[in-house]
Amino acid sequence: MKISKEIKIAMVAVLAVIIVYVGIIFLKGLKLFSNDVSYYVEISDIQGMPTASDVRANGLKVGSVKNIAFNPQKQNMTVEISITPNFKIPEGTSVYMTKEMLGSAMMNLKLGPDPTKVLTPGDTIYGEAMVDLMSAAGNLLPSVEAILVQTDSILKAVNTLVNDPALATSLNNIESISNDLKQTTTKVNRLLGNDIPQIMANANGIISNLDTTTTRLNQIDLLGMAQKADLTLGNMQDMTFKINTAMSSKNSSLGILMNDNSIAMHLDSTLRNSSLLLEDVRLHPKRYVHFSLFGKKDKATESAQ
């Protein structure tokens, strides 16, 4: 069965319409077959936002603008947005408009505080007024002018300070201080490089000697020496006690010697007689010592002498 030329033309025309429709939807960013859910936003100004614009939440794209309509009863815009079904919008969420520097406007969701309570698809979300950058800049102009006045005053004060001769004097003083610090740093470096190692070496030697001395002191039996010294002192105390007892006793020889005056008198008499005897021996030695070169003399001769 042959298809007529008219039918072929009609089929081609229908296919072309379908392709154009799908292409327009694709260029708008809309999905032909989608399971996204719709919400409605009431906002006073959309700032020229086209359909298929992004809908974002905390910077993340969660949907797109599906349809925009003017609401004559409230004198505002009703925007249908298509949201990904797995993204839940909490109650209390609002929408605000933002506009990129060189791009178009878009909607941003300001999520509600309680994520456990969510909106039902088809609910209405109320929008907030858009903060226009130019308007914000215009509002900032008075503050900028006040800042400029204060800046001018600050610059004048800085200029006065720079032209003050005291500043040059201060800079010269700072330069002098810097030179002194440089010299001090050089001396400190020299000290650290030369003297400190020698001091540390001497300190190490002293510590080593102290360690050796401590080791030797630890080897000395101080307890034994103390015990011997204590024993010696005890013996001396005992000896002293015995001497004192003997001196004070009249029955001992030492006591008699120390306490009896007659012994002292006898000793004095003996010493006196000994002294007289020695003096007589010195004066008359022949009475006590006889020397003869020719033999012993007779008794008559001795008597005659």
Image (tube, helix red, strand yellow):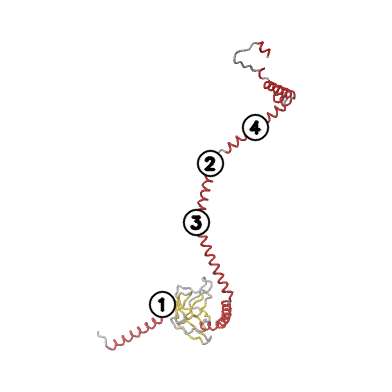
Image quadrant in which the C terminus is located: top right
Q: Position of residue 58 (x, y in %)?
A: 48, 74
- Circle 3 is placed at which residue position? 194
Q: Residue furthest bottom?
A: 6
Image quadrant in which the N terminus is located: bottom left
Residue beneath the point at 50% across and 53% down: 198
Secondary structure, mark 2, is helix
Per the model, the C-alpha gap separating discs 1 and 2 is: 97 Å
Q: Which mark lies nearer to you, 3 or 2?
A: 3
Q: Which mark lies nearer to you, 1 or 3?
A: 3
Q: Are marks 1 and 2 in contact (CB under 8 Å)?
A: no
Under mark 2, the amino acid is Arg
Under mark 3, the amino acid is Asn
Secondary structure, mark 3, is helix
Can residue 80 be seen here? The reply is no
- Circle 4 is placed at which residue position? 236
Q: Earlier in the sequence, mark 2 or mark 4?
A: 2
Per the model, the C-alpha gap separating discs 1 and 3 is: 85 Å
- Circle 1 is placed at which residue position? 34
**Callout 1 crowding tier (Cα within 10 Å): few <14, some 14–19, many ≥20:** few
Under mark 1, the amino acid is Ser
**Looking at the image, residue 211 lies above or below residue 78:** above
Q: Is residue 162 left or right of residue 248?
A: left
Image mark count = 4
